Amino acid sequence: MNLLMALSAGFLLFCITVNAEAENRNQWENQHVFAINKLPARVTSYSFKDVESALTGNRDNSRIHMLNGDWYFNFVDRHQDKPVDFYNAEFNHKSWKTIEVPSCWEMKGYGTPIYTNATYPFTVNPPFIDRDNPVGSYVKEFEIPKEWDDQEVILHFGGVSSAFYCWLN
């Protein structure tokens, strides 16, 4: 009986330790994390204020607010060097450079472009990233149109090539 209790306690301790290690891992190094707070995939559609507007097919009259354009941008080579709390409304990001969105930051002079389609460009050691992991921090100031009050609003990113976090103030 004592042996069974000791084995059970040991197994429980092992499970707790493994679970704690998984929780401490960076989300982008956890192969079990695919998406957090992401809506299910669906067909691309456009919202219009009324049927008549929709029937014209003019997407410029749709209820879409494009966020394309210049965004404040900060680039660091290692995730440990990323700006802390830059998503707070009080954070002063005005000294940051700007970058055109959508774009590829490597084509704008940041980071290292990867020119390969036949070999994997990184050392494979899942789930760990055994190299510097660059981080781009973006800030865009915009306002939601007043007529959208009390409506569901979807923030859609059409070209993120890696993990990202989004904060709204």
Image (cartoon, helix red, strand yellow):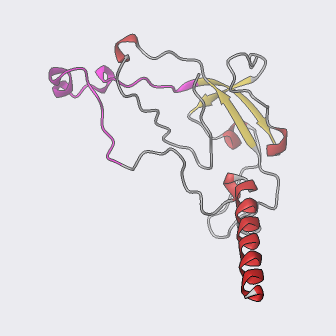
- The quarter of the picture where the N terminus appears is bottom right
Q: Position of residue 84 (x, y in %)?
A: 79, 31
Tell me where residue 86 sits by quadrant. Answer: top right
Residue ID at (72%, 86%):
4
Furthest residue in direction top, as rendered: 146
> Residue at coordinates 59% horizontally, 18% vertically from top-left?
141
Name the residue located 62 percent from the left edge and 64 percent from the top edge: 117
Quadrant of res 90: top right
Q: How many marks?
A: 0
Q: Residue at x 42, y 23 (%)?
A: 65
Seen from the viewer's position, the closer of residues 94 and 24 is: 24
Decide whether residue 11 is among the magenta residues.
Answer: no
- Asked whether residue 68 is drawn in magenta, I would say yes
Tell me which secondary structure the magenta stretch mostly adopts: loop
Q: Is residue 65 above or below residue 22?
A: above
**Position of residue 65 in the picture relative to residue 2 (left or right):** left
On screen, residue 155 versus residue 63, left or right, reads right
Task: Please name whichever residue, 168 or 101, is drawn nearer the observer in this view of the structure.
Answer: 168
For residue 97, above or below residue 45: above
Give coordinates of residue 6: x percent, y percent. 78, 81
Classify residue 92 by image quadrant. Answer: top right
Residue 159: horizontal and vertical position, in percent?
Answer: 52, 43
Determine whether 3 is above or below 138 in the image: below
Residue 169, given in percent of the width and then of the height, sits at 59, 21
Q: Who is closer to the viewer here, 138 or 151?
A: 151
> What is the span of residues highlighted in magenta in the rendered image?
42-69
